[in-house]
Amino acid sequence: MSLDSNPDGQPKYKRVILKLSGEVLRSSETGDPIDWDTLKRICQQVKEIHALGTEVCIVIGGGNIFRGLSGSKDRGVDRTTGDYMGMLSTVINGLAFMECLEKMDVVTRVQTSIPMNQVAEPFILRRAIRHLERGRVVIFVAGTGNPYFSTDTAAALRASEIQADVIMKATKVDGIYDKDPMKHDDAIKYDQITYIDALQSRLNILDSTAFSLCMDNEVPIMVLSLNEEGSIRRAILGEKIGTLVCSKPQ
């Protein structure tokens, strides 16, 4: 699929994976795992890009409820058990997204890597692609179904499988910097950077397994701010926003 921007208002990206951290759903005021106003704002952005004709998949983390790695370090939970607890947390978040999107009249399907037939469909690649072709949003939950793999890796794996045009990692930061912009006033933002340069600069974009999958399969990664008004829609339409990581400059 071509990644050239279309001047007629058509989407630059036809099929995307939207990668979200579970932490973006946590309420900063009450500490509740899911802030429903935040969820509605994100779903509204998903609805906007879906209306453009873009095929949308969502991979959501579970850190707002339980994070396996921190559980094993801080609470003495066995790492494998903790990772499965984290995977189940992503299912809760995925169902919340489904509920919110469908109330906005966006038909949605949740596919899980861990069989739970009464809750969600099992992940089946051909079925997922068929849902996308029929205009449904697909939410991938439960990571890869295996411990020791993050939801970053799940996003990279699913993007490779469905041949997504890009992974859009929506964060609290408006792109990738050479150092932490929250700590350094002289931090420099990249508009674009190649996989190799990102590796050499030791930029922490995705975890190493996920990043290697994207690099090997040439899946571009876009990092952008979730807090900027309409940022996802603007990126879909080809506006230069955030930072694009790819095999060569575009």
Image (cartoon, rainbow, N blue to C red):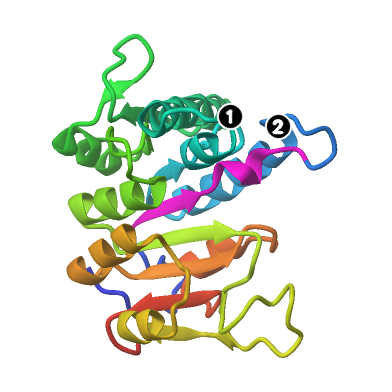
Report x, y in % for residue 85.
Answer: 45, 25
State the SS at label 2: helix
Q: Nearer the viewer, residue 173 or 136?
A: 173
Report x, y in % for residue 199.
Answer: 36, 79
Name the mark on residue 100. Answer: 1
- In the figure, is residue 144 to the left or right of 101? left
Q: Nearer the viewer, residue 1 or 249?
A: 249
Q: Residue furthest front?
A: 76
Q: Distance between the residues labelled 2 and 1?
A: 9 Å
The numbered mark, 2 or 1, whose residue comes first in the sequence reads 2
Q: Report the residue at 52% width, 30% height from top.
A: 76
Q: Give the range drawn in magenta.
A: 15-27
- Number of numbered discs on residues: 2
Q: Do the residues labelled 2 and 1 touch (CB within 8 Å)?
A: yes
Q: Report the residue at 30% width, 64% height from top.
A: 165
Picture quarter with the C terminus:
bottom left
Report x, y in % for residue 203.
Answer: 47, 76
